[in-house]
Image (cartoon, rainbow, N blue to C red):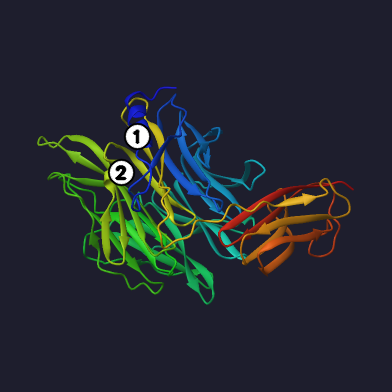
Amino acid sequence: MKYGYSALILASFLVLLGAAPLGASFQFYPISTGEREAASCRVATGAGGEVLVAWAEADSIWTRCWSYGAVGPAVNHGRGALPDVAFAEGGYILAFVWQGTIVVREDSGSGWRDAALYAFALNVTLPRLTGWWKTPTDTGVFLCFQTAQGGVRFAERRFGVWQDAELVPAGSSWGAPCFAQALPVPDLGAWRPRAYAMQEEGLVYSERVGGVWQAPVALHPGQFVYGGEFAAACGIDEEQHVLSNGPQPTCPCNVIHYTHGGPIGAWSDPEDLTVEFDTYTWPQDPAIAADEAGRVHAVWFQQHYGFNMMPTWKGLFYMVREGDVWTDYSQSFCCQRGRDADMDLRYKISPAIVFTQDFDAPSQVVLALDPTVTATESVPAPPVALSAQPNPFNPKTTLRFTLAARATVELSVCDVSGRRLFTVFAGTLPAGEQHFDWDGRDAAGREQPSGVYLAHLEGSGLAATAKLILLR
């Protein structure tokens, strides 16, 4: 394994720990194998504070999990490109492209398995996943991707089942590439999907209302602030947050803008976040997230050019918005350069940022974690352990877990394909030890055959899975 000069940079950051303001202290972890060129890295955080990173290396897709200060083994998922990951419904979802097909895999705690394939006559590319959670019984995953010609497709997973992909109408043809992404918006106490994508004339979105996709709506038409890459995220106030660079530059010179809007689409004026280092700056690879304290986190790489207009290096920038004020925390990344930035939030508070660092050849994937918890927030509770006794069992087993505080939870049993068989409990429980029995029957009272089943516990800020073995 070879890290060279970048390893010295990483080591130097490891000593910069301790009490610091939000975003001012990061720990850095090498993630990729170090043997081949790495690219297209993506990140997702779990309910227990763990972090999953996906990337492409040597024409294969890899994932690796960080948990409580340690990096686990790398998992090779086979040939593919352009991965994305999300945490939802008590487990991780992975999507990537292979031979013009979107491959979807899942891990609910018992190992990775194939879950869905989306193949069309036209090649597909750029899958983007969004996991969302409203209540223990209202949760799911959105998947957006596009054809080689720019057409947008949308698919979703509800209660363990992937639905067929739908074509998102655009009125006029979608531009290519369009970086499609879907987010949930409130809909009479539930959620409906909103698909964003980039057209030639700018950023637009379309919503599915009553099962029908509506005509697209443009963000700030005529202002010429969108036209390149973008990232979108939901906030706790149900607002949508968008970070995007401008139309493809001709200088090359460019800007990066932030805007936010409510469910009905009233968008704020775009705010220019570009950090001016030279005349020809070019922001790229935007990532955005909104935390439970109401802050907005923005990350991007910015290409710099010399006086001869030749690209020199890309610097990583990280800014946080509290109220209406942006604070620049980029000094934490003063020695980092590369591409492919992505971000998610641990415990929905603390940023986990992944990027491809190009100090050395081959390029390597690096994970940056901010361990800071501010005085206005509480330290998250430890992850919940779900157990079953007896196990193996016949005819029934008792599922046990302990809650650190009162919580609304759902406890269910699924088969190994993810199909829900029985909801053991759904409601609010007090703090303390809990126990519930499952007698090996589904919701209709039918006895299930011998085999492996999965018990899932989900709730606000917690998730756990236990493998059950039924022996008739």
Disc 1 crowd rating (10 Å Cα; few below 14, some 14-19, many 20+) is many
The residue lying at 83 percent from left, 56 percent from top is: 440
Question: In the image, which disc is placed on residue 234?
Answer: none
- Which image quadrant is residue 232 in? bottom left
The residue lying at 37 percent from left, 28 percent from top is: 7
- Which image quadrant is residue 133 in? bottom right
Mark 2 secondary-structure assignment:
helix
Say which residue label 2 marks: 332
Q: Amino acid at mark 1?
A: Gln
Q: Amino acid at mark 2?
A: Ser
State the residue lying farthest toward the bottom.
188
Disc 2 crowd rating (10 Å Cα; few below 14, some 14-19, many 20+) is many
State the residue lying farthest toward the left.
307
Provide residue 247's location: percent of width, then percent of height: 24, 53
* Closest to the observer, 35 or 72: 72
State the residue lying farthest toward the front.
19
- Frontmost of labels 1 and 2 is 2
Provide residue 204's location: percent of width, then percent of height: 34, 63
Provide residue 56's location: percent of width, then percent of height: 45, 35
The mark nearer the N terminus, 1 or 2, is 2
Say which residue label 1 marks: 357
